[in-house]
Image (cartoon, grey):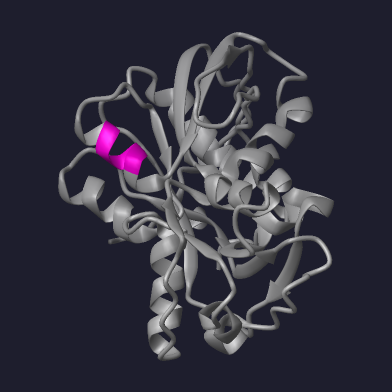
Amino acid sequence: MNLRRPSRIASALAALAIAVSACSSSSHSTTGSTGTTGSSTTPSTAAPVTGSLTVFAAASLTGAFNSAKPALTASNPRLSISYDFGGTNTLVTQIEQGAPADVIASADTTNMNKLVAAGLVSTPVVFARNKLEIAVAPGNPKHITGLADLAKPGVTVVLEAPGVPSGDYTRGVLTALHLTVTPKSIETDVKSALTKVTSGEADATVVYVTDVTAAGSTVSGVSIPDADQPAITYPIAVVKASKNQSAAEAFLQSAVSGDVQKALNAAGFLPPQ
């Protein structure tokens, strides 16, 4: 997949930032948002971004996207934003089936490639990176020190389902290390997997570093060495069927270099390379 780098986005969008409002995970909610002015080689004022916009985003982006709300909703509440957070594979399937999305923010390139191949999205842009981390109960009562411990008898593990980026990344790492882990259950996304640990139904799961950070004191994190980390990139793209292309492009730019990107950095996401 040909991922656009941030430098190749049209200069007219370089200063665009839109206000997006929060919504709960795996559901739509609509609030006001905004677009600010942009400039090219000569001073000009861009028309405010208005109308409605639906953003499909990987579940791991929930906290970062929502935490951008105060800065983004500070001006021009004329754009109505709906967020739909969930497993990337589920969101992609919904778009393939005609769901009315304007933007898709994926946790991997594999799922985004499906939309590119089908001609359903514009050229994606990488806007963030991440790492995997083991999440365990507070205090790590099972004394888990690494991935090898997840294969030990007496350790109950849950993983994300095949097709879910975090689950596929994890299985790839386990295979490379010649480890066999039999999960108690497979979950629809990282949030569901974490819930199994925080509720006491599982001893451990593997999610993103940012998920462990966002969970705070409800879990403890066990690091995975950099040598074993997969390359985790997050691409974002405008859905070609969008009825609000200008707002979709403005949101994309905010994720790359605006207020959403600032929120991503604060949440522990790594910047695009």
The answer to whether 198 is drawn above or below residue 208 in the figure is above
Asked if residue 1 can be seen in this view, the reply is yes
Q: Residue at x 61, y 22 (%)?
A: 35
- Among the 4 quarters of the image, the one containing residue 69: top right
| Position of the C terminus by quadrant | bottom right
Q: Is 114 left, or right, of 106 in this rendering?
A: left
Q: Residue at x 41, y 33 (%)?
A: 103
Which portion, as a residue range, is magenta?
A: 90-94
- Among the 4 quarters of the image, the one containing residue 19: top right
Q: Is 203 left, or right, of 185 in this rendering?
A: right
| Position of the N terminus by quadrant | bottom left
Question: Is residue 1 within the magenta segment?
Answer: no
Asked if residue 14 can be seen in this view, the reply is no
The foreground one among 160 and 44 is 160
x, y percent for residue 165:
41, 58
- Among the 4 quarters of the image, the one containing residue 219: bottom right
x, y percent for residue 146:
64, 83
Taken as a whole, is the magenta stretch helix, strand or loop? helix
Q: Residue at x 37, y 50 (%)?
A: 124
The foreground one among 196 and 40 is 196
The answer to whether 97 is drawn above or below residue 226 in the figure is above
Q: Residue at x 67, y 52 (%)?
A: 200
The answer to whether 9 is drawn above or below residue 184 in the figure is above
x, y percent for residue 6:
51, 54
Q: Is 182 left, or right, of 122 in this rendering?
A: right
x, y percent for residue 136:
69, 64
